[in-house]
Image (spheres, rainbow, N blue to C red):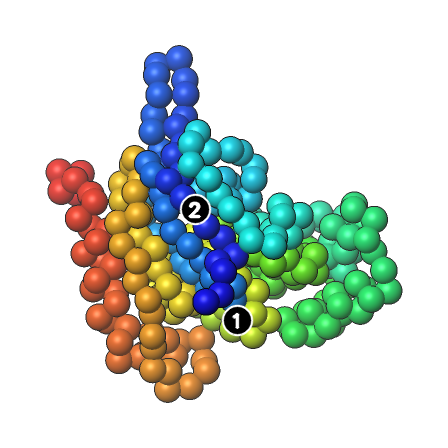
């Protein structure tokens, strides 16, 4: 049996302030296998992004352990909600920023960047500045900037949330297909249940704070075609949505609505 690329075992984390301690994550445990695309969903404020920061090594858990099999922190790619492209650099120079910083910029790396630009439909914009691109195109460029570092584990923290709905559908679908085609292990944080079902092989549901793993749901869709909307037309889609909706809605206090 293949060893998981990521294991979270009894991970706990708390925030501390002058007013006291706030427990964010309470004994979180799960595993992710190589090549899986996993989405993590849960109520707002439950600690999804905090968990991603712990996996990325940006902070340490209060207790428990996070094990990365064969992938150190230098092999983790992290894509945030905003593209954070530098306006004074061309798209190509933005994409090659990481290799420049860690002095790994080679001819082979430049060729790989060109290949990714072509795969993502951005090659003819490589000499443009970010201000000349649409929101969806900038998010593609931001993902290429992450992918050019050849991560073994890709962390996506609501990377499509800043896009309008139509662009979000198209970009998330296209990027999801490309990530799966490359075989990179990916973890997506999202509030959008439809997006989670459309993109993920498996969905981990967190409870309200202090967050625990409430449910894990494997996703198997019968796709009529390979269009971005195909997963939402799958006969199994509504069943998965209903399951997730019940799990999430049960975590909210009815008095807040």
In this rendering, the answer to whether 128 lies above or below 209 is below
Q: Residue at x 56, y 74 (%)?
A: 181
User: Residue at 69% of width from left, 69% of height from top?
Assistant: 116
On screen, 122 above or below 11?
below
Residue at left offset 79%, top offset 63%:
109
Q: Residue furthest right?
A: 107
Q: Quadrant of the C terminus?
A: top left
| Mark 1 neighbour density, 10 Å: few (under 14) some (14–19) many (20 or more) | some
Give the mark, 1 or 2, whose residue is nearer the N terminus: 2
Quadrant containing the N terminus is bottom left
Q: Nearer the viewer, residue 52 or 171?
A: 52
Residue at the limit of the structure toward the bottom, as seen here: 224
Q: CA distance from mark 1 to mark 2?
A: 22 Å
Q: Which disc, if any, is residue 149?
A: none
Left or right placement of residue 189 versus residue 177 in this view: left
Where in the figure is residue 155, as x and y percent of width and height? 53, 53
Give the secondary structure at mark 2: strand
Q: Is residue 133 visible in the rendered structure shown here?
A: no
- Where residue 41 appears, as percent x and y from the top left, is 34, 52
Residue beneath the point at 44% across and 42% down: 51
Q: Which quadrant of the view contains residue 194? A: bottom left
Q: Give whichever of 43, 24 is nearer the camera.
A: 24
Find disc 2 in the rendering and name its residue.
Answer: 8
Q: Secondary structure at mark 1?
A: helix
Residue 116 visible within the image: yes
Q: Residue furthest top?
A: 18
- Image location of residue 71, percent across then percent down: 61, 53
Q: Nearer the viewer, mark 1 or mark 2?
A: 2
Q: To which residue does mark 1 refer?
A: 180
Q: Residue reaching furthest left?
A: 255
The residue nearer to you, when weighing 231 against 35, is 35
């Amino acid at each position: 049996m293949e060893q998981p690329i990521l294991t979270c075992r009894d991970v706990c984390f708390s925030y501390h302030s002058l007013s006291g301690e706030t427990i964010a994550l309470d004994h979180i445990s799960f595993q992710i296998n190589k090549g899986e695309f996993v989405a993590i969903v849960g109520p707002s404020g439950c600690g999804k992004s905090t968990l991603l920061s712990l996996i990325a090594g940006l902070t340490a858990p209060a207790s428990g352990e996070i094990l990365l099999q064969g992938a150190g922190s230098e092999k983790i790619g992290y894509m945030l909600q905003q593209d954070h492209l530098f306006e004074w650099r061309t798209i190509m120079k933005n994409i090659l920023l990481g290799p420049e910083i860690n002095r790994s910029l080679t001819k082979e790396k430049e060729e790989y960047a060109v290949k990714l630009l072509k795969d993502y439909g951005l090659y003819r914009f490589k000499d443009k500045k970010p201000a000349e691109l649409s929101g969806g195109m900038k998010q593609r460029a931001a993902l290429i900037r992450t992918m050019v570092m050849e991560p073994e584990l890709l962390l996506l923290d609501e990377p499509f949330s800043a896009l309008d709905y139509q662009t979000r559908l198209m970009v998330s679908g296209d990027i999801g297909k490309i990530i799966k085609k490359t075989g990179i292990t990916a973890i997506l944080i999202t509030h959008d249940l439809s997006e989670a079902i459309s993109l993920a092989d498996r969905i981990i549901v967190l409870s309200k704070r202090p967050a625990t793993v409430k449910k894990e749901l494997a996703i198997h869709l019968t796709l009529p075609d390979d269009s971005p909307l195909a997963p939402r037309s799958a006969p199994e889609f509504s069943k998965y949505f209903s399951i997730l909706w019940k799990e999430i809605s049960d975590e909210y206090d009815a008095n807040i609505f």
